[in-house]
Amino acid sequence: SGVGDFDFTRSGGATRINAQGLIETVASGVSRLNYPLIDGVVKGCPSHLLEPQSTNLFTYSEDFSNAAWTKSSSAVTITSNVAPDGTINSVYNLTGTNANLYTGGTPNIEHTISVYAKSNGQGKDNFKLRLGNSTSSSIIVTDKWVRYELTATPTTTVFGLTVDSSPNNEFDILIWGAQLEQGSFPTSYIKSNGSQTTRSAETASNSGDASTFNDSEGVLMA
């Protein structure tokens, strides 16, 4: 009957992970059932996403060849691999011994950086994420897309995605979907293409009133 349904609001689209493990965009005002993606594989039942507003401060989240990304000591080339959203020709191969891909940022504020990465099948799979003067522990990518993240409070004025090889001093990995946002945790993927992009906050309320639930028998809502 619809009695007890939430009133859900969000202006603009947003992404979720569907039952096939792919990132897809849902329309404005449509709520999101997000499937847990663990080690690159969907495991378990979906949960309802209800996120605050957040902005991807990277202006080109998928185009690492763009001049907005400052590069040094690395090679960044486009490939025909399938991306986490199921598309082709948006995955980049990152090779070298010390890859700096960064843009400007505001220091002394907590940020979280995240990026999807997987092996290129060359056995050079160790890398690290760096955010300003903070570095993650050594990461070993697998043959599946996994989102890696790091939260820190940088003290430098220029920071972003920096990948350091470890321990073999050389890496050869595939990357997609970089995101930099203020806050202590990564939110769902926000695609950007030419400007910083914001996903609006979501609300869910008004799931009926006292007559909807039989309180005489005791109902626990969580």
Image (spheres, rainbow, N blue to C red):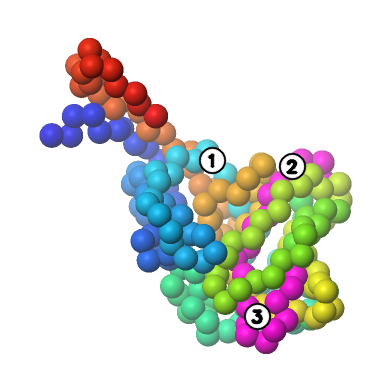
User: Was residue 118 drawn as part of the magenta stretch in this picture?
Assistant: yes
Q: Nearer the viewer, residue 220 or 26?
A: 220
144 shown above or below 153: below
Q: Type of residue at label 1? A: Gln
Determine crowd level at label 1: few under 14, some 14-19, many 20+ residues with C-alpha closer than 10 A.
few
Q: What residue type is labelled 2?
A: Glu
The quadrant of the rendering that contains the N terminus is: top left
Q: Answer with the quarter of the image where residue 21 lies.
A: bottom left
- Mark 3 → mark 1, Cα distance in angstroms: 31 Å
Q: Does the magenta stretch include residue 122?
A: yes
Question: How far apart are labels 3 and 2 at the CA level?
Answer: 29 Å
- Residue ID for mark 1: 53
Which of marks 2 and 1 precedes in the sequence?
A: 1
Amino acid type, label 3? Asn
- Give the mark nearer the N terminus: 3 vs 1: 1
Q: What percent of the width, then of the height, locates residue 35?
A: 41, 55
Residue highlighted by disc 2: 110
The residue tagged 3 is: 93
